[in-house]
Structure formats: C-alpha cells, structure tokens
Amino acid sequence: MSGEPPEQEGRVARRQRRNREALIRAASEVMTEKGMDGATMLEIAERADVGAGTVYNYFRSKDELAIAVLEEMMHDLALQIEKATAGIKDPAQVYAFGVRTVLEAATTDIRWKQMLYRSEVIADALYRRMGPFAIRDLRLGVAAGRFALEDAELVWRLTAHAIVGVSLAITTDVVPVGARNEVVVRLLCMTGIGTDAAAELVAGAERVREGKGGR
C-alpha cells in the first residue's frame, strides 16, 4: 500500500489543528475587546478566517470556546510563572508565587472573570492545566523539607477549587480585593506550613512580582 492515505490524514489533522488554534486566538482577542456577552461566533469565525459554520465543527457553543480560551491562558500563565521563577531555588517560594499569580489573573483578567460563574468547570480546568507544574512544586517542597503533606494532587485540587471560589467572591465584591494576600496565606497553609511561614512566602512572592527577586 502507498503512503498516500496517512499523508492525507496528516494534512487534515494539521488543518484541523490550525483552525482550532486560530479560533481560540480569535476568541481570546474578541472576548478581551468586547467581553464574552458582546462576542459573537460569527465575528470570531471571521477573525480566525474560517467559515461561519466551521466554528461549530470544533466548539458546540460560545461557552465551550470560552473555556478552551481559558485553558490555553492557564497553560500560558504556567509557562510565565516558570520563567519568572527560574532563578528561585526554594520550591516553596515558586509555589507561593504561582498561587498568588493565578489568583491575581483570575480576579483581573476579563476572560477569567466572565467565566468564574462556571466555577466547577473552571476549577477542574485549572487543576488539569496547571497541575503538572503546581504538583511538581508541592512535591519538591516536601522533598526540601519546606512543606508537610501526604497527597500533593489532593492539595492542588483543593487549592484550585478554592482559588476559583474566592476569585468569584472577590469579583462580586463579597471579599475585598485587598484580601488577596491573606487569601494566599490561607491557601499556603494547606501545604502543612504555619501562618507565619506562609506570610513570609507571600511577602517573597510580592518581591518577585516587583522584580526584586526571591530567595
């Protein structure tokens, strides 16, 4: 048999991947400009340069597309955290910076804020997309004697759901924006460290955000 069918399948797969990526990029742009309610599937399709009906071959609804946008943002944010903490040797400080960064993104970026009402779905996406990074840092923290926990996956799952829940509370003015650092302290306490140690890590995360480095 010739290699033609696999080659054709490869071309189809590449085209599908490009279309999907283009739709996610376009949706991210339009939703940033107009908000989720103001964005339309037609405009997103036009921005992605695909047929109006093609978008439904990849996403059943605008809500599903918005979740895909958010999942890509989560992965990109994880990579940004990796870059920002590349010179930090303390895995506990890396983890603290990551939690603080995610909480800020969830409460300031319009694409996150508009999806927080789908808390269960978003928390699951956060657990999956950023989990490989967060769970690794939790385990490294245990190995370094910084954290005291038995199940890193469980701690990250609880943290992911807590981040989404408290972010919704912040964006709906139930919890003040100024409480972000206190929230992160409480989230870090789930790693088995005390309040004082958690507060020190949050202070370090703030220094990293300000470009002053961490330990």
Image (spheres, grey):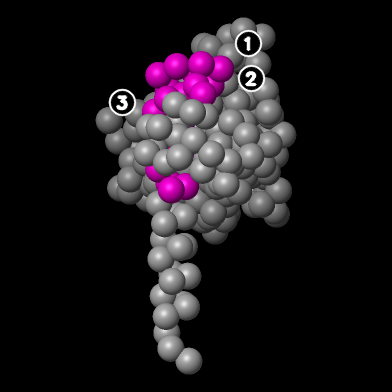
The magenta span reads 19-40
Query: Crowding at label 2, few (<14), some or many (≥20) Cα neighbours within 10 Å?
Result: many
- Residue 106's spot in the image, x, y percent? 53, 26
Determine if residue 74 is in view: no
- Residue 103's spot in the image, x, y percent? 53, 27
Pick whichever, 135 or 96, lies toward us: 135
| Residue appearing at x 49%, y 35% in the figure | 52
Q: Which quadrant holds the C terminus?
A: top left
- Residue 157's spot in the image, x, y percent? 68, 43
Q: What kind of secondary structure does the magenta stretch mostly adopt?
A: helix
Side (left or right) of 88 relative to 183: left
Answer with the quarter of the image where residue 143 lies: bottom right
Determine if residue 213 is in view: yes
Query: Crowding at label 1, few (<14), some or many (≥20) Cα neighbours within 10 Å?
Result: few
Element under disc 3: loop
Q: Which disc, if any, is residue 210? A: 3
Examine the rendered structure and indicate whether residue 129 appears above or below residue 32: below
Pick whichever, 58 or 144, lies toward us: 58
